[in-house]
Amino acid sequence: MPTFMVIATFDPETDLPQMKSVIAEEVAQVKVLQGEGRLTSLHISSARGTVFLGILAEDAAEAQATVQTLPMAKWWAIDVYPTDQPPA
């Protein structure tokens, strides 16, 4: 299945108390996506307000849709990058 790197940056106008109120939901959905094999990695740069997500999906639209299931996605600008596998 194709892999994608999704770069999600927080809107600078994000309401931090509101965002913090969905952390438990976010963690639960991350676990669901990992269990389904759709989320392969998650890295957060708090200092840069950026989240890096490894996604397995059939195409970029499906990768975007997967990320949109995360509660915090409503505060993100999302860029989806197809990735190539390293040569064997």
Image (cartoon, grey):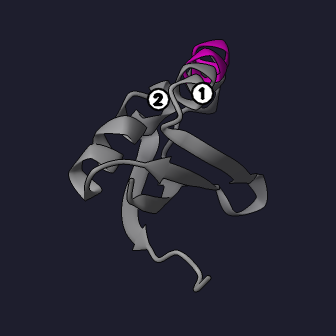
- Split into 4 quadrants, where in the image is the C terminus? bottom right
Three-letter amino acid code of the residue under disc 1: Val
Prevailing secondary structure class for the magenta stretch in the rendered image: helix
Query: What x and y, as percent, mark residue 4?
Result: 44, 61
- Secondary-structure class at tag 1: helix
- Specify start and end residues of the magenta stretch as a single range: 22-29
User: Which-is-in-front pick, marks 2 and 1?
Assistant: 1
User: Residue at coordinates 38% horizontally, 59% vertically from top-left?
Assistant: 2
- The quarter of the picture where residue 28 lies is top right
Between 8 and 60, the one nearer to me in the picture: 60
Rendered view: 81 above or below 67: below
User: Can you identify the residue that label 1 sits on?
Assistant: 30
Report the front residue among 53 and 50. 53
Q: Are marks 2 and 1 in contact (CB under 8 Å)?
A: yes
Sequence-wise first label, 2 or 1:
1
45 is within the stretch colored magenta: no
SS at mark 2? Answer: loop
Q: CA distance from mark 2 to mark 1?
A: 7 Å
How packed mark 2 is, by other alpha carbons closer than 10 Å (few <14, some 14-19, many 20 or more), is some
In the displayed structure, does residue 45 sit left or right of residue 83? Answer: right
Q: Position of residue 40 (x, y in %)?
A: 61, 45
Q: Is residue 66 above or below residue 51?
A: above
Q: Which residue is mark 2?
A: 70
